[in-house]
């Protein structure tokens, strides 16, 4: 199975890293109730200057359980392609993301795509934390699962395949050939 996996907010805690760097008037991660962070932080669009810092991506911590999940999915024989957005004005964002992947992901083989149009990327399943990416990909791939990774900014979103944690995703994708393995109450074959 070819798994399309988002980085920021799924593998990498970039939002948490920005909160750590700000240190003043800082909302908590649970305060980020929507994907567009400029609507949450007091400086509005100014929050995006953090994405141009030379270490914003490469120094961020992994999401809890992400590295173990990535490893288990590879060990199960799946191919993983990282699919990530790099801000248009980020001078070294892609390089930082590759550096992060090399430093944190075992057997990272440079399978990474930087795009603002994840719906155009071919795969068997997508895992992302942005509902709009999930919806657009699902329109292009109606018979394939699209998994919304749980983050505070998508809790209020209505999506059938919203999971609780990495363990649920791993159990589902490792057992996808078994119709008794369920994700959000449905097997892979019921998508």
Image (tube, rainbow, N blue to C red):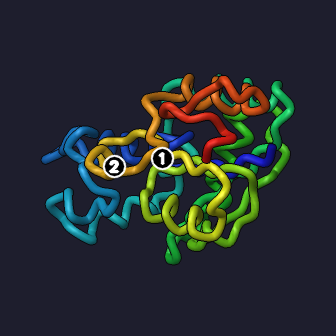
Q: Which residue is mark 1?
A: 148
Q: Residue at 18% of width from left, 45% of height from top?
A: 26
Residue at (14% x, 60% y) in the render = 42
| Location of residue 105 with respect to 92 vertically, above or below | above
As rendered, which of 35 and 62 lies closer to the eye?
Answer: 35
For the point 50% across and 76% down, the residue is 89
Residue in the picture at 44% in, 41% down: 162
Q: Quadrant of the N terminus?
A: top right
The residue closer to the viewer here, 177 or 86, is 177
Direction from residue 53 to residue 38 in the image, left or right: left
User: Label 2 to label 1, Cα distance in Å?
Assistant: 8 Å
Q: Which mark is residue 13?
A: none
Question: In the image, which disc is placed on residue 154?
Answer: 2
Quadrant of residue 188 within the rendered picture: top right
Q: Are marks 2 and 1 in contact (CB under 8 Å)?
A: yes
Give the percent coordinates (x, y) of residue 50: 38, 59
Where residue 18 appears, as percent x and y from the top left, is 35, 48
Q: Mark 2 or 1 closer to N-term?
A: 1
Q: Is residue 110 left or right of residue 88?
A: right
Left or right side of 10 for 113: right
Q: Is residue 17 positioned above or below 76 on the image?
A: below
* Residue 105, image quadrant: top right
Secondary structure beneath disc 2?
helix
Q: Nearer the viewer, residue 68 or 127?
A: 127
> Mark 1 falls on what kind of element?
strand
Query: Could you tell whether 181 is left or right of 19 in the image?
Result: right
80 and 159: which one is in front? 159
């Amino acid at each position: 199975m070819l798994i399309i996996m988002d980085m920021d907010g799924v593998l990498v805690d970039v939002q948490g890293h920005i909160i750590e760097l700000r240190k003043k008037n800082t909302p908590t991660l649970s305060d980020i109730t929507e994907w567009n962070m400029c609507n949450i932080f007091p400086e509005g669009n100014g929050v995006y200057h953090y994405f141009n810092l030379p270490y914003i991506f490469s120094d961020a911590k992994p999401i809890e359980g992400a590295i173990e999940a990535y490893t288990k999915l590879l060990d199960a024989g799946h191919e993983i392609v990282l699919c990530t957005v790099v801000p248009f004005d980020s001078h070294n964002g892609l390089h930082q993301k590759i550096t992060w992947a090399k430093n944190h992901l075992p057997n990272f083989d440079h399978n990474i795509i930087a795009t603002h149009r994840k719906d155009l990327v071919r795969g068997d399943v997508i895992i992302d934390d942005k509902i709009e990416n999930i919806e657009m990909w699902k329109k292009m791939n109606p018979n394939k699962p699209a998994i919304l990774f749980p983050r505070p900014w998508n809790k209020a979103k209505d999506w059938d395949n919203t999971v609780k944690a990495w363990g649920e995703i791993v159990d589902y994708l490792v057992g996808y050939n078994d119709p008794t393995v369920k994700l959000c109450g449905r097997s892979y074959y019921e998508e």
